[in-house]
Image (tube, coloured by chain):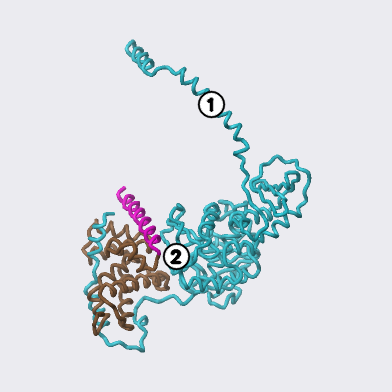
Chain colours: A brown, B cyan
Amino acid sequence: MGIIQTNIALYAFERFGDAVLRAAYSRTGNLSEAEDITQDVFLKLHAHPENFNDDEHLKAWLLRSVINKCINYHKSFAKKNRIELEDTDYFTRTCNFNDDDNEVIDAVRELPPKYAAVVHLYYYEGYSIKEIGELLGKNENTVSSILQRARKKLKKILEEDML
Amino acid sequence: MKNNRYKKSMDKIRCSEEFRTEMTKKLSEPIDSDTEYADSVSDVEYAPKRNFIKYAVVGAAACFAIGGVGYSILGGISRNDGSDDKNHFAANSSIVETTGNEEGITEIAPEIPLEEITDIAPEIPIGYVEVSPEKIALAEKEIYPVLIEKAIAFCEGNITLFFVKDGGLAGGESDSYGRGVIIDNYELSSYFKELSSIYWMKAENEMEFTMTANNTFELGEVFLYEQCVYIMDENLHDPDIFYPATINDIEAYSKIYNALRSCPLVDDEAENTTEDLTENTTNAAEVADANFPPLSVLEELAGLDYSPETCDGLPEHILTTDDGTVYQINLTDKWVWRNGSEEAKLPETLAKRIYVLLSLDAFSSEDIPVTYTKPDHDSENQDENEELENELANKLQVEENDLIEPTTVTTSINEEIEEN
């Protein structure tokens, strides 16, 4: 049994568009970049439709794709030449962010991208370490180690912010 | 951070209506198989294929790790805050500019103005490559055109310099000034003295490394990638940046190397990389061997001009060859004693080679007809230490007996206070 959809990309976007955007954001720390990457992921699926067993399969594929895209984007010419814009105001306006949210988001933004991705998958998407390992193609120990370091870093960042 | 805070905040991030409408429209359009999806994505321009960067990075990094560490540990590199050498650097170097294409050095350009060099130089970490001419050619050909971000490759006899550029790595990009430079025939030693002794290079994000024994290291995540050890510096806030071990990490380097040398790579692509890149070298020991073959080191040791022993130094390393010759080596003062009766001054180049080989544990290989031992100076002094300990224990016992009761002291102090 697979997902039967005439337009799998549109279905995926409606179902997981926000999740992909969040994952992209967790990796890039920039909402407009995250939107670009999200768009790219769904357009790719639109151009090359794939078969998925179920929604979870689809979601895992999307998350894996978005993380890969983030890696490419991170190294791309576009990223290098993009003028970095402060996203905080944008968040405040468009996402109803308060100071608390900004603090958390800023802390995550300060994390190295790879850490942020693991934190996001673990804390937001609720994947287990084993599942994250499978999703990212990494050893469980690696994921565990990254998560541990990410926690320490977050703690440090948030403590510094409190001072 | 509390988990629910993160979730709560992330929940607020949603696709804007504008974005949602635009995406729905795009995804509702029929698929045009002739149109590559990426073309329709604004702002996302992928870096060109550049696997050669990976090859070059790994190749050069191996040279950094092997040659640089050995050289610098032995005093080749130190910090110097003066700026005179920088001026010398700019003024005396002939500079060749390229256009950043993959053809290599294409034209000779005027010198970069002195101000520009001096503005940047203090921030540039450097590395030293002690390599064969073939590897120099590799560095020039492969690294140079792509201008690895935040990396400088030094080659014997000439210097390949890549200026720092913020942002990600893209194939074929230029440096901050839109160009790359190669500086020939510069005095390496004077330049080393004034720049950081940390070498690092950017590696591809996709590089997958086997992590098995690295969780205990405090220097950051450590990986063995073929002939190099890369250390992930968390302080850089970018875990995708790896660089070879620094001179300060030499102990960790050898420890890591020993722990991980047998680890297989997990990435097929990485394995292919290895085949392409390292026809002659497959691991750190072989790289070391290629540069400083252990056997040639033994031959050089045997060929030194020995004289009857007069020096009182302590050996730091002992090498015993299969024919029974014992070489006691002191790398700090650069002396070698043969069979405990003769001594010779250790040439600096030979000392460097021995140091690198020891760091890589190369003498432990079964193929090498030599046994390495670490002198046990502690056991020699064991009896003496025991005597001292007994003496100290007796003394403490006596002092304990002589101690005044604390309550007596308190009482007398209180009495004095009352009197006053």
Q: Which of marks 1 and 2 is nearer the N terminus?
A: 2
Chain letter, disc 1 residue:
B
The residue segment tinted magenta is A139-163
* Residue drawn at x 23%, y 67% as measured from the top left: A94
Left or right side of B115 for B348 = right
The amino acid beneath tag 1 is: Leu
Asked if residue B210 is among those painted magenta in the image, a careful observer would answer no
Same chain check for tags 1 and 2: yes
The amino acid beneath tag 2 is: Asp
Of helix, strand and loop, which one carries label 1? helix
Task: Name the quarter where the N terminus of chain B is drawn.
Answer: bottom left
Residue A36 position in % (x across, y down): 32, 74
What is the number of the mark on residue B392?
1
Q: Distance between the residues labelled 1 and 2?
A: 61 Å
Q: In which quarter of the image is residue B130?
A: bottom right
Answer above or below: position of B237 versus A64: above
Of helix, strand and loop, which one carries label 2? loop
Residue B169 position in % (x across, y down): 45, 69
Q: Is residue B196 visible in this depiction of the protein?
A: no
Residue A122 position in % (x across, y down): 30, 62
Foreground label between 1 and 2: 1
Q: Mark 2 and mark 1 in contact (Cβ < 8 Å)?
A: no
Q: Give the residue at the far top of this rendering.
A: B419
Bin the neighbour count of mark 2 within 10 Å (Cα to Cα): few under 14, some 14-19, many 20 and up. Answer: few
What is the number of the mark on residue B166?
2
* Residue drawn at x 39%, y 60% as measured from the top left: A141
Q: Nearer the viewer, residue A31 or B279?
A: B279
Q: Is residue B202 visible in this depiction of the protein?
A: yes
How many numbered marks appear? 2
Residue B176 position in % (x across, y down): 48, 67
